[in-house]
Image (cartoon, rainbow, N blue to C red):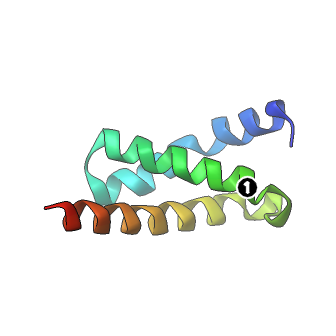
Amino acid sequence: MTEEKLREVYDKYYRLVMKAAYDVLKDFDDSQDVCQEVFHKLIQKWNKVSPEDYAGWLALTARRSWISSKKVIENMR
């Protein structure tokens, strides 16, 4: 994966991932953390995710990530 390709995917899907996270977390900073985690996971699985599946994969991964984040936050209380 090139940096240019990653930037293109990030620019195209950033808002989708942030919205998926923010809709549930209702916290901008936590949503940014989830967004960063999701794109990091995409980098790790770049060869396994086809470009046609980016939107669905990113949205699903964001939902799963916020579930994990929410559990961690709840356990800290």
Residue 32 drawn above or below residue 26: above
Q: Position of residue 30 (x, y in %)?
A: 34, 46
Seen as rendered, the residue at the extreme left is: 77
Does residue 34 appear left or right of residue 56 in this picture?
left
From the viewer's perspective, tell me whether residue 37 is left or right of residue 51. left
Task: Look at mark 1 in the image and give the residue it sits on.
Answer: 44
Q: Residue at x 19, y 61 (%)?
A: 76
Vertical placement of 19 versus 73: above or below? above
Residue at the image position 65 percent from the left and 58 percent from the top = 55
For mark 1, give the secondary structure.
helix
Figure check: 31 above or below 77: above
Residue at image position (73%, 55%) is 44
Q: Is residue 16 visible?
A: no
> What is the x, y in percent for residue 15?
51, 42
The part of the image, by quadrant, that contains residue 20 is bottom left
Quadrant hosting residue 3? top right
Q: The N terminus lies in which quarter of the figure?
A: top right
